[in-house]
Amino acid sequence: MKQWEVFVMELAELAPDRDLELTIRTLEPGLHKYTYKRVKARVFEREQDAPDRLQVRFGRGQLAPQRFGIQVLEDIERLPAKYR
């Protein structure tokens, strides 16, 4: 089970049962900890319902009181094709 983190302005941005485009960062220990990536994902209100955990922070870094589950559906490439 991986652990991810996302920054949002309000919890309503994490609408359950919809595919969302999010910028998440990994909380896994090691060389790539805090690495960001853009993904298409589905967020679950209960972390037990998803394969991975999601920690939510608000704009100024405050930790949300509840944890969510997340399923990463696909990575979104951020570089234009001419730079790949």
Image: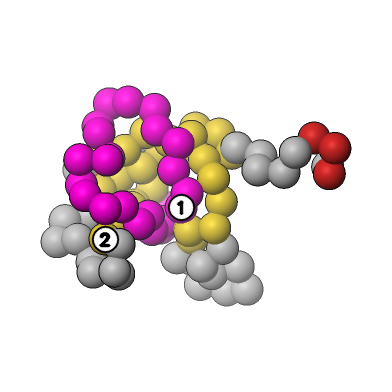
Task: State yes or no: discs 2 and 1 in contact (Cβ < 8 Å).
Answer: no
Q: Which residue is mark 2?
A: 58
Q: Which residue is mark 1?
A: 24
Give the x, y percent position of residue 25: 48, 58
The residue drawn where x is 27% and y is 26% is 17
Q: Is residue 10 left or right of residue 52?
A: left
Q: Is residue 21 visible?
A: yes
The residue drawn where x is 56% and y is 51% is 37
Give the x, y percent position of residue 31: 63, 73
Q: Residues within 10 Å of mark 2 (few under 14, many from 20)?
A: some
> Which amino acid type is shown beneath numbered disc 2?
Phe
- Quarter-wise, where is residue 12 in the image? top left
- Mark 2 vs mark 1, foreground winner is 2
Give the x, y percent position of residue 77: 66, 39
Span shown in magenta: 1-24
Find residue 62 and name its label.
none
Quadrant containing the C terminus in the rendered view? top right
